[in-house]
Image (cartoon, coloured by chain):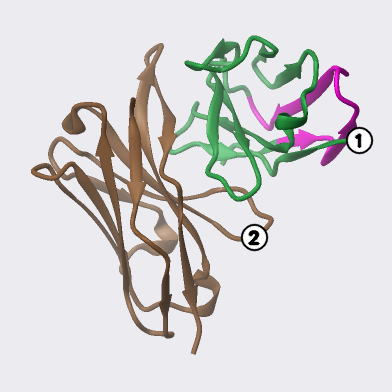
Amino acid sequence: QVHLVQSGGEVKEPGASVKVSCKASGYTFMTSDISWFRQAPGQGPEWMGWVSAYNGVTNYAQKFQGRITMTTDTSTSTAYMELGNLRSDDTAVYYCAREYMLRGINWLDPWGQGTLVTVSS
Amino acid sequence: EIVLTQSPATLSLSPGERATLSCRASQSVSSYLAWYQQKPGQAPRLLIYDASNRAAGIPARFSGSGSGTDFTLTISSLESEDIAVYYCQQRSSWPGTFGQGTKLEIK
């Protein structure tokens, strides 16, 4: 069974950085890419970016450019998302999701369980 | 950016009733639309992909239909475990966009 297991919740001060991990199991890690989302209370998921598990190529949402880094470690089947210069409005639940191809299109299946990041002084 | 508008915002029904959720796109997305279920405190889960295909392990009471700009998620006979927010997502244009969600409540 395919699973994505994320690291635990974090509390950070404004201006700090946070690094969230996403460990994959149940499939060959390099065959599917990983997207990262975040979700504020009462809101839908917001796409943050994508990383290729095959070669590490990334594509970030414009609003995060300059303060986000996505990487993968194929030896441990783990993807990472690091967000810097945190602000209070970065407080949200952060999710990774596998980009899984079905009928020629990538869909998000499964998702990690989520990591709550709280930014507060 | 393609905007997805879901209706209604909240739906309150009794167990055993039929639920019909709507998702309208601001321009054609062909069949490149998915539905996700998010139960309270959980991550989203893929229910339907490519407008009408059930994902692995999804009960047959969930079905999707539509193409172009108008899509429907139908739950044929509601169960109490179906309490959740349901999101549609288009993948016609990268990286895709989500609707604002429909909250399903059980009376």
* Relative vertical location of residue B6 with respect to residue A100 in this rendering, above or below: below
Whether residue B25 is in magenta: the answer is yes
Residue B7 in the image, given as x and y percentages of width and height? 81, 34
Provide the chain ID for the residue under circle 1.
B
* Magenta highlight range: B5-27
For the point 55% across and 13% down, which residue is it?
B54
Residue A51's label in the rendered image is none
SS label for mark 2: loop
The chain displayed green equals B
Give the image location of residue A117, x and y in percent: 46, 68
Instruction: Give the residue drawn at x 84%, y 40%.
Output: B10
Residue on which disc 1 sits: B107
- Given contact means CB atoms under 8 Å apart, are the residues at marks 1 and 2 in contact? no
- In three-dimensional space, the C-alpha distance between marks 1 and 2, rounded to whole angstroms, equals 24 Å
Residue A111 lies left or right of residue A28; in this view the side is right
Quadrant including the C terminus of chain B: top right
Residue at the outermost left position = A75
Q: Can you tell which of label 1 and label 2 is closer to the viewer?
A: 1
Chain A, which colour?
brown
